[in-house]
Amino acid sequence: FVEEGYDVYHAYEMRYPKKVYHDHGFVINGGQHFFRSSEATLRFLDMAANRCVEKCDDQVMYNGLFWELDIEWDGGDPPAHPEAIRVVSHTADKTNAGLLVESATGRSRLTNHTFKIWDRDFAWRLSGGLPELCPSKNNWLGMPSVNNGQTDKIQLKLALFISGMIIA
């Protein structure tokens, strides 16, 4: 992916923050990014740093910032257009159903940085815990949701943090 030349790479997240997902049909993951060193990337990161002076929720911060960037989507349509390919669930668990699958690219008219949102096959972020095998031979990044029987929200967050990022 490095040769593609985008300034910033993002991964799709599940559905949090809910309002952003409801308004735009997808959210980006606050913990899976790749930043190329460029003036445009620095402008984007300066905006992020200014939004999060002290403690903040990176997921909420990045998704709020993303929609302030005045995005020009390559191909014209945003990723959540009516014909977009989405996850289909063939089981009773519909947690992942309806999530976007395909990558999207564009440019911020505000910072002039280019970006790519990795497709879910490349950057796997779905509910269901650790798979026995990589989702596909094209999968490079993975960050599964792991519950481990935790019902307390703080303990669940800790379990997710401890499960960490898996690089296949």
Image: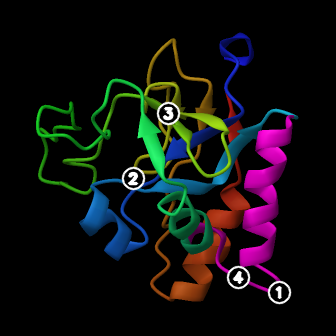
Image quarter for residue 20?
bottom left
Name the secondary structure under disc 1: loop
Q: Is residue 133 left or right of residue 81?
A: right
- Find out whether the residues at labels 4 and 1 contact each other: C-beta distance under 8 Å: yes
User: Residue 56 shows which numbered tag?
Assistant: 4
Q: Is residue 30 left or right of residue 13?
A: right
- Find out whether the residues at labels 4 and 2 contact each other: C-beta distance under 8 Å: no
Please report whichever mark, 3 or 1, sits nearer to the chain's N-terminal start.
1
Q: Is residue 119 above or below residue 93?
A: above
Image quarter for residue 29?
bottom right
The residue depicted at 74 percent of the width and 17 percent of the height is 2
Identify residue type, mark 3: Gly
Q: Is residue 53 left or right of residue 134?
A: right
Q: Is residue 40 above or below residue 7?
A: below
Task: Look at mark 1 in the image and give the residue it sits on.
Answer: 54
Please report whichever mark, 3 or 4, sits nearer to the chain's N-terminal start.
4
Identify residue type, mark 1: Glu
- Find out whether the residues at labels 3 and 1 contact each other: C-beta distance under 8 Å: no
- Find out whether the residues at labels 2 and 3 contact each other: C-beta distance under 8 Å: no
Name the secondary structure under disc 3: strand
